[in-house]
Image: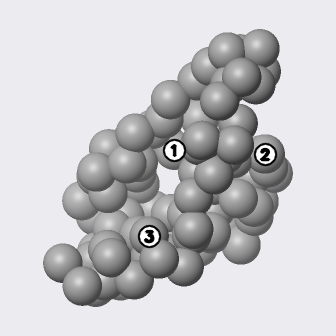
Amino acid sequence: MRVRSIRDAAATVRGRRTDLNLSQAELARRAGVSRKWVSEFEAGKPTAEFGLLLRVLAELGLVLDLSSGNDAAPSRVARRVDLDALLNEQRAR
């Protein structure tokens, strides 16, 4: 998924957390952050600490992959993903 804003990242984290049937409190405990931090991040707080975000992503099994806009441009069409299908696939696991 291409993340263009903190809200995109927050929605991905929230979706993955709920797919894994984790409460905000349980995710916070496992990732070593506060429940308040998880709640604020999922609400789109624009000043989330990057190090804490990386901990949460790791706990959820999510990977942050950075590339330049130039690297992604030639295969933009090939990289489009049906997000609904992807979420349904994750829920079926």
Residue at mark 1 to residue at mark 2: CA–CA distance: 15 Å
Secondary structure of residue under mark 3? helix
Quadrant housing the C terminus: bottom left
Image point (70%, 36%), residue name: 76
The residue where tag 3 is placed is 86
Q: In terms of depth relative to the viewer, which is nearer, 74 or 15?
A: 74
Q: Position of residue 86 (x, y in %)?
A: 44, 70
Residue at mark 2 to residue at mark 3: CA–CA distance: 19 Å
Residue 61 in sight in this render: yes
Question: Looking at numbered disc 2 in the image, what kind of residue is underneath it?
Answer: Arg
Question: Looking at numbered disc 3 in the image, what kind of residue is underneath it?
Answer: Leu
Image point (48%, 35%), residue name: 64
Q: Which mark is residue 53?
A: 1
The residue where tag 2 is placed is 4
User: Disc 1 vs disc 3: which is toward the camera?
Assistant: 3
Q: Is residue 45 above or below residue 72?
A: below
Secondary structure of residue under mark 2? loop
1 or 3: tag closer to the N-terminus:
1
